[in-house]
């Protein structure tokens, strides 16, 4: 099974969808960057002293953060979609209502596609 999320940012343009793998990658990197920055700030706050190496790392992380945020803004006006796989476990029981609907669909569709004799 799967789920598809989509966003129509500009309906005046032709609706061409772009996958979100690159966007998702940038968002994950930005999240890791923010987590690392928070860790460094927490360590510095607990120690009560300014470590020059940690300050340099924070500056570097802030520069990278700005670059990633700029890259995300470039995606802002584009239509996109995201497909998420949802694994189905064999332990799930079939829903009788769904089985009945599938059987009805198969019966109706078989009537539509009868080969000519």
Image (cartoon, grey):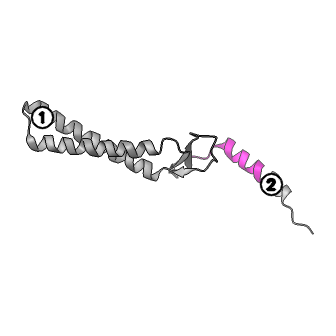
Q: Nearer the viewer, residue 17 or 112?
A: 17
Which of pointers 2 and 1 lies earlier in the amino acid sequence? 1
Magenta region: 92-106
* In the displayed structure image, the side of residue 16 where residue 43 appears, left or right: left
Looking at the image, residue 59 lies above or below residue 106: above
Q: Residue at x 24, y 44 (%)?
A: 61
Q: CA distance from mark 2 to mark 1?
A: 68 Å
Residue linked to disc 1: 44
Query: Mark 1, residues whose alpha carbon is within 10 Å: few (<14), some, or many (≥20)?
Result: some
Report whether residue 22 is seen. Answer: yes
Give coordinates of residue 94: x percent, y percent.
Answer: 61, 47
Give the residue at the far bottom of this rendering.
117
Residue linked to disc 2: 109
Q: Nearer the viewer, residue 4 or 115?
A: 4
Give coordinates of residue 92: x percent, y percent.
Answer: 54, 47
Q: Residue at x 14, y 36 (%)?
A: 43
Give coordinates of residue 105: x percent, y percent.
Answer: 76, 50
Secondary structure beneath disc 2?
Answer: helix
Q: Nearer the viewer, residue 65 or 43?
A: 65
Report whether residue 1 is seen. Answer: no
* Quadrant of residue 110 within the rendered picture: bottom right
């Amino acid at each position: 099974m799967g789920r598809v999320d989509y966003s129509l940012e500009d309906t005046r343009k032709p609706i061409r969808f772009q996958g979100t793998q690159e966007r998702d990658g940038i968002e994950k990197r930005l999240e890791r960057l923010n987590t690392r920055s928070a860790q460094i700030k927490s360590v510095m706050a607990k120690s009560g002293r300014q470590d020059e190496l940690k300050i340099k790392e924070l500056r570097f992380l802030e520069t990278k953060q700005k670059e990633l945020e700029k890259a995300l803004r470039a995606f802002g006006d584009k239509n996109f979609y995201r497909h998420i796989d949802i694994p189905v476990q064999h332990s799930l029981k079939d829903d009788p209502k769904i089985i009945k609907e599938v059987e009805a669909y198969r019966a109706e569709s078989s009537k539509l596609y009868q080969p000519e004799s």
